[in-house]
Image (spheres, rainbow, N blue to C red):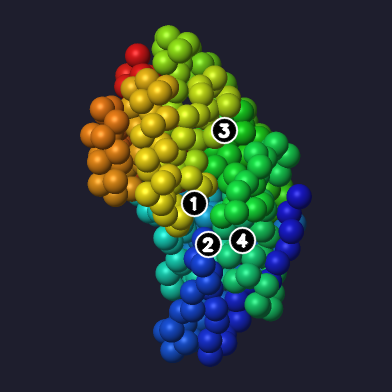
Amino acid sequence: MIHLVSSFVCRPSFAVHRFRRLRTLLPAALCLLMLAGCDSGATPTGTGDATQVPGANKLLVVVTTTQIRSMAQSVAGDLADVRSILTPGADPHEFEPKPSDVQAISKSALILKNGVGLDDWVDKILTNAGGQRPLVTVSAGIPIHLGDTSEPAGDPHIWFSVTNAMTMTRNIRDAFIQVDPTHAEQYRANTEAYLAKLTDLDKYIMDQVATIPPDERKMVTNHDGFGYFIERYGLTFVGSIIPSMSTDAEPSAHDVADLITKVKAEHVKAIFLESSINPQLAQQIGQDAGVQVVDTLYGDTLGDVGTPGETYEGMMRFNTDTIVAALK
């Protein structure tokens, strides 16, 4: 379901949120941005009269995460310019929007968010304005894992199960059709082609994980962010360096000692980190526990253009291949 929420107006100051913490942009800078970004011609209505990229017959669609961007671009094809606020390689737990992100949102035809507490700052930005923008939560209909004190809404890392990604894709399709019904058939055709790729991807991951001996399908991660992957593909979660779903938390000396004990007792073969995370503590734990540290996974964001993880499918294949190679 699309929710219409207000876009931006010119105001002297405005508070925006990080993914986890409230931050305030400089009032003077934001005022200049709002003056530049207020465009009375941008009036998406959700009935086909959607904002287009200037000089092109494309919708301007702003999304919060790189995973959603990859899915949305596959659904849109050449009908939309899809821009992600979160950049490749960034840590969403340490991220805050830039003025250019705010301006893009103010001109967009459609905004797509992950939900589950990951990017609720979008709502807080949009509700401070006049005018309306369609905002869609693409996690609708996905069974959400229980969260923790840092993620009370639940585990937001839903994209690590390809079946969840398929639900996200269908939600994205429906959102495009609602704002641009003229091209509904093309959105549906693009979606069916992409869902076929995701079906193949899901089977590929299943087949690759099945090559790991059952008693060696054990994962230790930097933070507790791979729960959907572990559940969907039949691995066992032993523990994480940061005993939290957010990288904002910090492990105590007791947490580290307890993890080393578990790694040794469970004969874990590797500790896995996202490439965006500082590996220093993990390397020390790996040395103390006598296991290798693999610090090349894609986690909360995709990779840069030209890397194996520049698309959602590429990220999932690379992660799978890397995990399987380390555990076999």
Disc 3, SS: helix
Q: Residue at x 28, y 27 (%)?
A: 291
Check whether the beta carbons of the residues at disc 1 and disc 2 lie within 8 A of each other: yes
- For discs 3 and 1, the disc positioned in front in the rendered view: 1
Badge 3 or badge 1: first in the primary sequence: 3
Decide: marks 2, 4 in contact (CB < 8 A)?
Answer: no
Task: Give me the C-alpha separation between circle 3 and circle 1.
Answer: 15 Å
- Determine the CA span between mark 3 and mark 2: 21 Å
Considering depth in this image, is 166 or 110 the residue closer to the camera? 166
Specify the amino acid type for callout 3.
Tyr
Query: Which of the two labelled residues, at mark 2 and mark 4, occupies the earlier sequence position?
Result: 2
Alpha carbon distance from label 3 to label 4? 21 Å
Q: For the residue labelled by badge 4, is the local secondary structure a helix, a strand or a loop?
A: loop
- Three-letter code, disc 4: Asp
Residue occupying the point 44% across, 89% down: 28
Query: Badge 4 is on which residue?
Result: 120
What residue appears at the point 65 percent right and 77 percent down from the top-left corner?
128
Do residues under tags 3 and 1 come within 8 Å of each other at their CB atoms? no
Mark 4: few/some/many CA within 10 Å (<14, 14-19, 20+): some
Disc 2 crowd rating (10 Å Cα; few below 14, some 14-19, many 20+) is: many
Tell me the element at label 1: loop
Q: CA distance from mark 1 to mark 2?
A: 9 Å
Whether residue 193 is visible here, answered yes or no, is no
Q: Label 3: which residue?
A: 228
From the viewer's perspective, is the residue at label 3 or at label 4 nearer?
3
Where residue 62 sits in the image (x, y, percent)?
Answer: 53, 57
- What's the mark number on residue 318? none
Q: Quadrant of residue 4?
A: bottom right
